[in-house]
Amino acid sequence: MTAPIFVTGAAGFIGFHVAERLLRDGHLVVGIDNFTPYYDVALKEARFARLKLHNAFIPERMDLADAAATKELFRRHQPKRVVHLAAQPGVRFVDPQPYATSNVVAFLNVLECCRNDLIEHLIYASSSSVYGANRKLPFSEHDATDHPVSLYAATKKANEMMAHSYAHLFGLAATGLRFFTVYGPWGRPEMAVYKFTRAIAEGRPIEVANAGKVWRDFTYVDDIVEGIVRVIERIPVANSAWDAKHADPATSSAPHRIYNIGNDHPEELNTLIALIEHELGRKAERIERPLPPGDVLETRADVSDLRRDVGFSPSTTLSEGIHRFAAWFREYHGV
């Protein structure tokens, strides 16, 4: 093993899966998390406990918003690759302060450490939510993303701009990944797949937006992880053909790149509910609601750039993914 790979948000949903995959692949992994109580901390503890079964896992409980502690963390472990997945999630969360602290201040601290410690590649999580009011489908990295419709989306757009500025000013190679509606085992309890499954299993009603006429590019977590792992070793370089007069948002004259990671196959919310009902063997009781502020009717990822550059695009069907999630759900909750 050489230098460790940093995975921030390692007790989180995607961070846990990325750390576990890197450990299985033989890497030394420093997993960092501050265990915020946005959702059940016991679930985060259970994920972290699984990671600590690996001898090559180094756990770090700390807040990346603490600049001095973050600087000391980088000094102690001296990574060369950083996968930054820590964030305050949720397009419907109403308290703005955690977004500013976790998604902007902490990210700035990570950027500063990456440039000062000569990190070879920073991979960071963006989100499909940055497409905001954009109605051109599928969502392409080459389209403008100037009209976010949630504060979460605004902070993720800010991350992209901050990373690009560090790439331009300091040559920090950085890749931003826009994830599309990730689901799977060990998922977040407030997300639709987990929330609906638990409610239906317990005989509680589910709240369904817009009569279920909402389409999402549901992406199974293993496909997200595969995309991340492949991107880690693809260090971006400046695009020599980049033209400021016809600026391409996906590339740059600096070593910065943006990729979508999504299934490129939107499914209706009603289809998701039907699949969960089938797996649990019981019908859902529904409460119809209007589409919440900050939500959009449809998402769909254009993943042609990802497929071309790393030879991979997500392919797990929703039916297969829900089958795997339901199996994990039954085991974890003893259903």
Image (cartoon, rainbow, N blue to C red):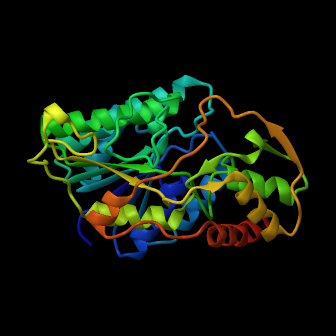
How far across and how far down the image is residue 44, in percent? 60, 53
Asked if residue 187 lies left or right of residue 52, the reply is right
Asked if residue 287 lies left or right of residue 25, the reply is right
How far across and how far down the image is residue 302, in percent? 41, 54
Which residue: 32% across, 46% down? 73
**Taking 266 as reference, is 293 above or below it?**
above
Which residue: 62% across, 68% down? 321
Image-quadrant location for residue 246? top left
| Viewer-side residue, 56 vs 86 | 86
| Viewer-side residue, 288 vs 27 | 288
How far across and how far down the image is residue 275, in percent? 74, 65
How far across and how far down the image is residue 11, in percent? 53, 54
**Taking 245 as reference, is 2 above or below it?**
below
Asked if residue 76 lies left or right of residue 152, the reply is left
**Residue 300 makes an appearance in the image:** yes
Image-quadrant location for residue 328? bottom right
**Residue 56 makes an appearance in the image:** no
User: Split into 4 quadrants, where in the image is the C terminus?
Assistant: bottom right
| Viewer-side residue, 181 vs 1 | 181
Which residue: 88% across, 60% down? 283
User: Split into 4 quadrants, where in the image is the N terminus?
Assistant: bottom left
Determine the residue located farthest toward the front in the rendered image: 136
